[in-house]
Image (cartoon, rainbow, N blue to C red):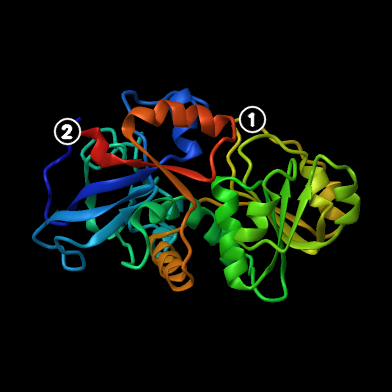
Amino acid sequence: MERRDVGSNDVLIEIQYAGICHSDIHTVNGDWGPQPFPVVPGHEIVGTVAETGADVTHHKVGDRVGVGCLVNSCGDCTNCRNGDEQYCANGMVPTYAGVDRDGTTTQGGYSTHIVVDADYVLSVPQNLDPAAAAPLLCAGITTYAPLRRWGAGTGKKVAVVDLGGLGHMAVKIAHALGAEVTVLSQSLKKQEDGLRLGADAYHATSDPTTFEQLASRFDLIINTVSASIDLNAYLGLLAVDGTLVNVGAPAEPLGLNVMSLIGGRRSFAGSMIGGIALTHEMLDFCAAHGIGSEVEVIPADRINQAYERVLASDVRYRFVIDTATLN
């Protein structure tokens, strides 16, 4: 794989760590349709600046930086001008499996170096552990964005569906925002972890009494599951004007009875990462509150094994590749 030459507004990053996201596995397995193989996954990237273009002023050689899920957008549409580059009306450029500005396929962070437009390179605070910071560039912003958008904070009751790579970040961030946090998981096997990470309560959804006990309780539910769930059952847990936000991206359609919404003026929404400014805000917030991902750092020759373990829910809570082992 070759990277493009460093342009006038580009940054060459020597990658140190790259997180493994479920999206990587969906892409590799073709769950979201045909892909432009060969593709190098990875959009949770932390490294150091190795070279900058002549016009770059806000990054310098040696800086700790990160790259998340997008590496370009049009910059001109209403969404881009509003700081929502991830919803670019002309199509944002994903970090991998997308079409780059030179017409080539973008390639991600399972690599030693990457060249990225400086406007999409993020400053990573020095007090964050770089391995634990890498998943913030996807899992962190994916959960921070809806928590901020729907007002999670003091006096709000927030539920997080599943305690995985996304879910554990949602718990940490919602707790730091001041919300009362409940984890809803299939079983109680991760209950101790959930409470340690900041949850106030933990309930097993395999117990049918859970849905009776918690009916109409929550202002906000963040669903992090990338598989089908009974939406109507979870909507019943919302208070009047509550919102269920999907951040997990299942390959199959989800079923919904509209009466589950009408009965409590409830909302069902979706959210996808965040713009560059919001991602910077998230990184600063995590640095201020000492929030990083719970990670297991692995060498590159264990990536396939890590994929299998992710699919088996056998990770607490994010695999991160030490990219030095690619050499």
- Label 2 amino acid? Glu
Q: Quadrant of residue 177?
A: bottom right
Secondary structure at numbered mark 2:
loop
- Label 1 amino acid? Glu
- The extreme bottom residue here reads 154
* Separation (CA) of disc 1 from disc 2: 35 Å
In this rendering, the count of numbered labels is 2
- The extreme left residue here reads 54
**Horizontal side of residue 291 vs 64, given as left or right:** right
Q: Would you name the residue on which mark 2 appears?
A: 2
- Can residue 195 be spotted in the picture? yes
Which residue is pictured at 63% across the width and 73% down the height?
Answer: 178
Q: Would you name the residue on which mark 1 appears?
A: 252
Q: Position of residue 240 (x, y in %)?
A: 83, 64
Q: Position of residue 109 (x, y in %)?
A: 31, 41
Looking at the picture, tell me which residue is in the foreground, 120 or 21. 21
Please identify, in this view, whether the residue under mark 1 or under mark 2 is nearer the observer.
2
